[in-house]
Structures are given as C-alpha cells and as structure tokens.
Amino acid sequence: MHSHRELQQRKLSYQQQLPIQMVTAVVVLDSKLNIQYVNPAAEALLVKSSHKLSGLSFDDVLNSTSIDNERLNLMLSSGQEFSDSDVTLEFFDGYRITVEMTASSVDLNQTSHILLEFKQIDQQKKISGEAFQHQQWESARDLIRGLAHEIKNPLGGLRGAAQLLGKEITTEQQEYTSMIIEQVDRLTSLVDRLLGPNQLPKMSTQNVHVVLEKVHKLISCNNPKNIQFIRDYDPSIPEITFDEDKLQQAILNIISNAIQAINITGNLTLKTRIASNQTINGKKIKLSVQISIIDDGPGIPTNIQDTLFYPLVSGSYNGTGLGLSISQTLIHQHQGKLSCRSRPGRTEFMILLPFLDKNLPTNSTLHNGSLYNNMKRKPYEQ
Ligand SMILES: Nc1ncnc2c1ncn2[C@@H]1O[C@H](COP(=O)(O)OP(=O)(O)OP(=O)(O)O)[C@@H](O)[C@H]1O
Ligand SMILES: [Mg+2]
C-alpha cells in the first residue's frame, strides 16, 4: 500500500511530466492574451522555443490566424469554454496549417488564464489523401503491367516470324521485314519500361552522397542549358541501406524532367537532410534520409499534378509518362516515399528513405542538431 504522501508525490510527478510527452500542443495565455507557457508539442507547432515565445501574442508569432481574440476575452469573463475544429495558423513565411482548438479558462497562480489545446488536423487529412493516391497509383500500375505483359508475349513470335520470312525473300523485300523487326524492337523496349523494374534490389549499406555525386557528375558533363547545379548536403547523414543503381535511376528520372522543364536556364538543387517523424506509407518512421531535388522552372502543369506518378501521365508532347512512375516503384522497393510539391518557380521532389532497424543511427552517430533539421520547416529558434 502506498502512503497518502507517496501517492501525492506520484501524482505530482506525472502532472509535471505529462505535458512534455503530449502530442497535443498546449498554450497558456494570460489575461492580456500573451503567451505564458507552451509545452514541447506547442514549441514544435509554432516553430519557436518556449523561451522565445514567452510574453508574445499570437500576432507576434503568426502572420494571420483565425483565432478570435474577442471570443477569448469573452471567455475570460464568462468562463464559457469553446472548441473550433477549423482554425488556421499562417506563419510569416507563408506556411499554413489547420488545427483543432479547444479554449478553456483556468485559474493559475490566483489569476485567470486561458488554456488552449491544439491538434493538427491537416496532417491527418494529408495522410489519408496520400494513402488514397497510393492505392490509385498501384491499381493504375497493375493494370498497365498486365496489359504490357499480354502485348509482350506475341511480340517475340512476331519478330521471329519476320526474321524467318526475311530469309525467304529478295533483298529488296527484306527492307520490309527489317522495318517490322525495327518497330517490334521499339515496341518491346516500351513494353519493358511499362513493366517497370523487375529485378530485386541489390542492397548495400553506404553513404547516399556517393550516389548524388555520381549523378552530379553525369549531369554536369552534359549541360547544354548551362543550369547551375547546387549541392546542399548534410554531411553528417549516417550510412543507409539501399540499391545504388536503383536509387541513381530514380533520381536521374526526376532530374531529367527538371532539366527538360527549365526553360532557358535555371538552378537545380540537390539537398539532403535527416528527417524525423515522417509518415511513410501510413507508418510513422522515426528517422529517414530526405533527398530533395528542387528546380526553379515553370512547375508541374496543374492538370497532371494529382496523377503525376501514374504511368502514362505526361505533360510533354514527346514524353511517355513513365519516368516518375518508375522512380516511384524504385523508391517503394526501398520502403521509401517519393512525393512532390510544385508551384511556378519552385518544384521539389522529395525522396524519403527510412533507416531500417539494423542501421538506425544512434545519438552518437548523428551530428548535433541534424536530427532536427527537418523536424518542421526549420529547427526552431532557441
Ligand atoms: N520538375 C518538373 N517541372 C515541371 N514539370 C515536370 C517536372 N517533373 C515532371 N514534370 C511533368 O510531369 C510529367 C511526367 O513526368 P514523367 O517523367 O513521368 O514522364 P515524361 O517525362 O513525360 O516521359 P518519360 O520520362 O517517360 O520520358 C512530365 O511530362 C512533365 O510535364
Ligand atoms: Mg520523364
């Protein structure tokens, strides 16, 4: 049996620790609506440390918000708590999030305060949207694969028959059989691309920058548009397990699109970071390597943005629309995720490769701070 004092102490210790562990962001405002306390989840949400936030109002931290100050003031006098399931927070860099907010009034240190609890909901919407997109992509890919498989079988026979026929006819007539063979070969290579990567990955553990450097060399050798290639690497990223050829292919497909899209000249950035707490295929992944390929070209045409990764979706008159679908398959073979954000002037393709358990970095293998590089948009200011 625990004594009353022990129970009290236990309760107190839980009360002190819980706000630190909570996923819900908690903010306490004083009666002038200035921030007095934030828990770590609120620090992450507002991308600032509690030290920086203390004494500020939401107007100092946010460019705009749908939090209604009048309603908060009214609540202070009436004590009537309220919830709002669609509160937007817009930061000074233009980044916007949607949160669910509950406001209640509490007495702390004998004065009235406001307790705000925030839950980010657009993240949940994004995850279910991603899962839907992924399902659609898989069905489109399977349909095309099935079709490609059916086309491939007779092509072999067609080629063989044309070859045999070629032996029976005059040299002039052979021109026609060679045409048949040439076209069959063209169709076979298209069908092979439609079938997608068919080899199992050959995994090895190494530094991702090895691949990026090879890619950089390749694209620098042939650069008629005189594009500036910028490398923005986090050199502290530990080694990770992947198939070098497949990763290289996935990145090259993305880069070749960017190079094609850039009009006259422009910039292309290869960026690496450690990303924490990302959702990959519906699973929360603690640590992953993020490789971003960013260009300042015209952006993805809006009519194909939703189906960008589907096979045969192309915005260019001579494209087959297979490059990104193949990249997606290759990244999936690594249990990773390929996504894209695009607007005119900035297109970013982001590859996330999870650290599999066996080479999950420990604190000692990670450079200070690099873990937080992508925790949010930027590490929050201390
Ligand atoms: N960085 C980018 N900027 C603008 N548009 C892009 C970019 N990347 C891809 N796209 C658009 O996405 C489309 C699909 O790309 P994808 O690589 O899948 O096919 P493709 O390039 O048309 O053909 P393929 O790669 O099979 O030769 C492209 O046609 C292009 O319109
Ligand atoms: Mg392409």
Image: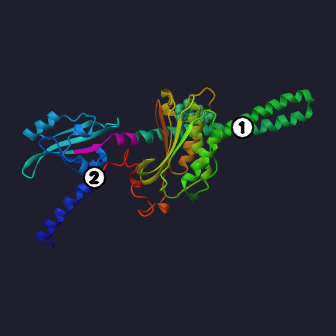
| Relative side of 89 to 346, left or right | left
Residue flagged by tag 2: what amino acid is it?
Pro
Marks 2, 1: nearer the viewer: 2
Q: 250 or 168: nearer the eye? A: 250
Viewer-closest of 53 and 241: 53
Q: Position of residue 311 (x, y in %)?
A: 57, 36
Residue 158 locus on image (x, y percent): 78, 35
Q: Which residue type does callout 1 highlight?
A: Thr
Residue shown at 78%/38% (left/top)? Answer: 157
> Hey, which quadrant is residue 314 in on the image?
top right
Mark 2 element type? helix
Q: Residue at x 39, y 55 (%)?
A: 369
Q: Are marks 2 and 1 in contact (CB under 8 Å)?
A: no
Residue 260 to residue 206: above or below: above
Q: Is residue 274 above or below residue 263?
A: below
The residue labelled by disc 1 is 188
Question: For mark 1, does the 10 Å Cα neighbourhood hold few (<14), some (14 to 19), or many (20 or more) residues?
Answer: some
Which residue sits at x=85%, y=36%? 163
Image spot of residue 29 (x, y percent): 16, 45
Magenta stretch encompasses residue 125: yes
In the rendered image, the vertical position of residue 200 relative to residue 365, given as above or below:
above
Mark 2 lies on residue: 40
Q: CB of residue at label 1: within 8 Å of ligand 1?
A: no
213 vs 88: above or below: below
Q: CA distance from mark 2 to mark 1?
A: 56 Å
Tell me the SS state at disc 1: helix
Highlighted magenta segment, given as a residue range = 117-127
**Residue 276, percent across and down?**
40, 52
Q: Is residue 312 visible?
A: no
Residue 209 in view here: yes
Q: Where, quadrant-wise, is the N terminus in this rendering?
A: bottom left
